[in-house]
Image (spheres, coloured by chain):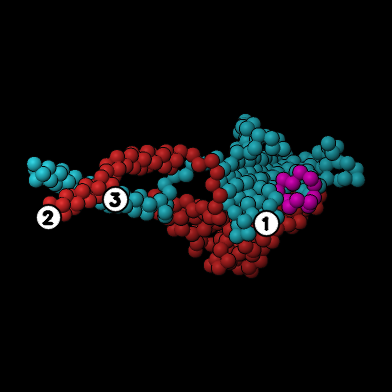
Chain colours: A cyan, B red
Amino acid sequence: MHEQDIAVRLERLEHRLRRRNLLAASMFALGASLALIGTSVATPDADVVPEIRTYKLTVLDSEGRTRVQIAEDASDIARNSRATGMTIYDAKGDERGGIGTMANGSAVMALDAPVGVGYKVRDRAGMRVAPDGTAVITALSNEGSFAASLVAQGNQGRLELSRKDSARGEISTRVLTFDSDSTKVEKVP
Amino acid sequence: MRDLEVEARVRKLERRAGRWRWLLVATPVLLMAIVLAGRGFARLEVGIVPEIRTQRLIVLDQEGRKRVEIGEDAPDLDIKRNARVAGLIIFDGNEQERGGMVTADDGSATVALDAPRGVGYRVSDRAGMKVGADGSALIGVLSNAGGFAARLIAQGAEGQLEVSRVDSTEGRASTRVIDVDADSR
């Protein structure tokens, strides 16, 4: 009876050990597969990510300062219209320009003067295509007015050259078109 | 005596086998967890990362060539520039720099497009706009002969147009300057 009992228990143990060996072998195979899959997936990921989708991309310089940001403006930004695109920043962390589309339907590229240089609205050079297709390439003076612009409107182009006379409070603008050359004088708004 | 010894050894074996019984339960749970975690990661990869912060972003074309780079110039950059810049640089299919939109350490902000390497004058800038540290602005196109061919300038309180031509025999540039009330050469 006792021998029989031992035999049963031994058989049970042998069965368990066989099962455990099988499990160990399976675990080893699974581990090896996962390691291989991990390696093959990780290699391209580490070098090249096929696509990145994000709401905001910030590129920092070696000092940790933001120098480029690609994103949509914050909803409370102080701008004529909310923009989405790329903004560049100088080494002092001030916005110095960008390229983007605006909520008002225009597409704009602009460069700004450093903070504290010239007129408070710092745009100094840029190009803009309005929602109606009108296009402007312009350079603005530190006095805060358009100084030289190329304009495409309707079926023709024109060159506008301006001078601001702060003492008189006037802006003189010479307008050259295909067949005319005229000067207009306006009060500074 | 021998029976007792056998009994003790069998009991010991049974205890050992019982000790690892949890593995049978734990293994499927572990596998399930790995699968679920994998699905979670995959969702992150194909989804949207709320914000990415980096010091350099490089965009490659299908051939693996660098076509766009956003970052700061490396200190040992092999291209000669007036000042170290940070911003976006574009590259052509030969991985030659062809332009960019940057701020520079000299306080300027610039957008520029370049001619392919080996075409025209050795300084490859051909079109662009720049706002200097003093707030002066210019928008210009440059010829393959070198120098500005035409540019709009805002300086002081006024603007002007300059149109230039380089005399290849004399190597001198003639410039016509048009402003609000004059047209001079």
> Which residue lies under the disc numbered 3?
A31
Q: Is residue B91 visible?
A: yes
Label placed on residue B2: 2
* Chain letter behind tag 1: A
> Where does residue A72 sit, x and y in percent of width and height?
60, 38
Q: Does B181 lie within the magenta span?
A: no
Q: Nearer the viewer, mark 1 or mark 2?
A: 2
Q: Which residues are magenta?
A: A111-123
Q: Residue B132 at x, y = what percent?
A: 71, 56
Q: Judge left or right: residue A164 versus residue A107.
A: right
The residue that mark 1 highlights is A91
Q: Position of residue B82 (x, y in %)?
A: 64, 64
Crowd rating for badge 1 (residues with CA inside 10 Å; few <14, some 14–19, many 20+): some
Q: Is residue B143 left or right of residue A48?
A: right
Q: Are marks 3 and 2 on the same chain?
A: no
Q: Residue furthest right?
A: A167
How much space separates mark 1 and mark 3, taking CA atoms? 49 Å
Front: mark 3 or 2:
2
Query: Residue B36's quadrant in the figure?
Result: top left
**Which mark is nearer the camera, 1 or 3?**
3
Task: Kindly check if marks 3 and 2 are in contact, taking CB atoms under 8 A apart as contact.
Answer: no
- Determine the secondary structure under disc 3: helix
